[in-house]
Amino acid sequence: MRGIKRMLWLPTLALLVVLSAGGWEVAPAMESGDCLGCHADSGSVGERAAIDETAFAATPHADMGCLACHPSVGDSHPDDAGAFGETDCSDCHSDVAAAYAKSPHSVNAGCTDCHNPHEVRAQHEVSGYDMNRQCATCHEGQEMTERHRQWLPQTRIHLASLPCITCHTGSEKMALELYVTNEGQSTAEGDFELASYQDLLALTDGEEVASLINRDGNHIVSIDELRAFNQNPVYRGQRLHGMMVPAQMTHSYDILYNRWDCTFCHGTGPKSLQKTYLSFPNSDGTYSRVPVESGAALSVLYATPDFYMVGATRNMALNLAGAMILAGGMVMPFGHGFLRFLTRKNRK
Amino acid sequence: MTERIYLTPTPVRIWHWLNAFGFVALILSGIQIRFPEYANIFGSYKAAIRLHNTAGIVVSASFLLWLGYYLLVSRKMRQLYLPTIDDLCNGVVRQAKFYFLSYFFGHQSPHHASPDDKFNPMQKSAYLVIMMVLVPLVILSGLLLMNVGPMRTLAVLVGGIKLVASVHFLLACSLCAFLFTHVYLATLGSSPLAYFKPMLTGWEEVNHE
């Protein structure tokens, strides 16, 4: 009997050993939630290792999970002296890294100097204001304004209407993004400052913020909707501020000499600005763009009263009106002059 | 018999030619600013903008010179530029009849210029609108466009920067149209250059038959 028990005990023990050993292998890997259990709290891990949970959730990186970039993190973390095996950005973004490596900017800053991988967003989710804020962490605003003032007319207007990357990357095509601004304290942009998500939420009584202008919720802002917003006395304290952003971001940061030629922007004609978007803030700090319907140039004139780009936003209707006025001025020289020529003998 | 009369005092001639050259500079640079891909008159866009801004300031200053001279020095603003009731009711029609009909039959102008009555009723009415409405508006809208940043609140108040720029453009076209007519009418004197001479020397020769 004792022998039988011994015979059963041994396989059971072996099975337990195998199962437990196998258990180590099939146990679920650490999830992002596990990481954020500690890393969302700066009190636990310190400011440097802390992650803003909301901002991280809005990034494309969140879907990949923490271990995609930190593969060495295991159960012994953080007792293993913090080994977490950082992945290089170029492992995934090789084309961007290759383009950036060729730019003079790469000598001065690496990817993470400009992009916090835990808060990174797609280009269209970032406002022009945020783009400039990023550059301003190294390039001090006042100094940059003074340096541009040496050659750039209307310096403050240009710098308030253009993210740095519009001129300092190789992007050739531009889009116009319109942001709602609130009348407020004096700022670099004048007496209006960018409206926050909470500001817009208060204006829409808790409805989707885009409904402030996109009234029918069809995700295309019509010229009529833009005009209705601009003419509504309720929104007298709000104005639309336009910024010309690159249509497609590149990482070829440089001082580009073709941007010194004003006609790079001012001579391209209205076609360059046909792609227009209303850009609204979201609760997580990102922005969502709603395209604006392309309309008759004269309609756009009233639809975006504060965006005017000399030489580029002229429109055919006004040009025709001007031509008719000029033609009126020609009536006397040509009409009267012709009759004068025919009757010249009468005055001798 | 030919009589010489001193018709155009020196400050007015200075104003007139500052204005004339300023306007030509503004028109040419304005064409390049609005249509840069079709007109490169001054080498670069920035040069055109600088010239436009400079000429705008010169024209504004010369406008103040004109206003100051006629309001404060000669005190003839009302006398020379404000049409009387008779001018509006009869004089304009009489002058229009001359320009568009009797001129072609060789008749003389019903109006004879003198230092105290320089302009015919049509000139008075046109100059009043030009100098008291169009020029001040084009100057003010131009100053606003030159100072969009500091004057943004004002731009917003008047309907936005795009509206200001459009008004500026249409006013400029109107003044340009006036210029064509003005220069042409200046050739209708006893000889084509008869009216140009007083704007250079101040003196006009008047024939008494």
Image (spheres, coloured by chain):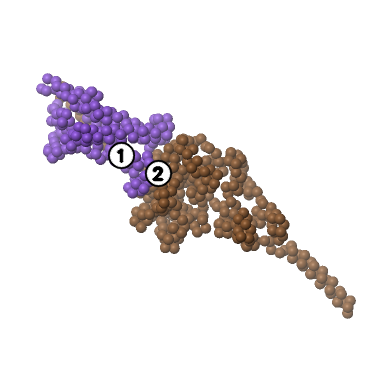
Chain colours: A brown, B purple
Residue A337 placement: quadrant:
top left
Q: Residues within 10 Å of mark 2 (few under 14, many from 20)?
A: many
Tell whether B25 sits left or right of A265: left
- Give B47 or B96, whichever is nearer the viewer: B47
Helix, strand or loop status at disc 1: helix
What is the x, y in percent for residue A12? 81, 72
Residue A243, relative to residue B50: is it above or below? below
Looking at the image, can residue A196 be seen?
yes
The residue at the point 38 percent across, 37 percent down is B34
Query: What amino acid type is highlighted by mark number 1?
Result: Val
State the residue position of label 2.
B149
The residue at the point 63 percent across, 48 percent down is A89
What is the x, y in percent for residue B205? 17, 22
Residue B175, relative to residue A174: is it above or below? above
| Label ID, residue A225 | none
State the residue position of label 1.
B138
Quarter of the figure with the C terminus of chain A = top left
Does label 2 or label 1 sit earlier along the sequence?
1
Residue B162, relative to residue A49: is it above or below? above
Q: Are marks 2 and 1 on the same chain?
A: yes
Chain letter for mark 1, please. B
Query: What amino acid type is highlighted by mark number 2?
Result: Gly
Looking at the image, can residue A330 be seen?
no
What is the x, y in percent for residue B136? 28, 39
Helix, strand or loop status at disc 2: loop
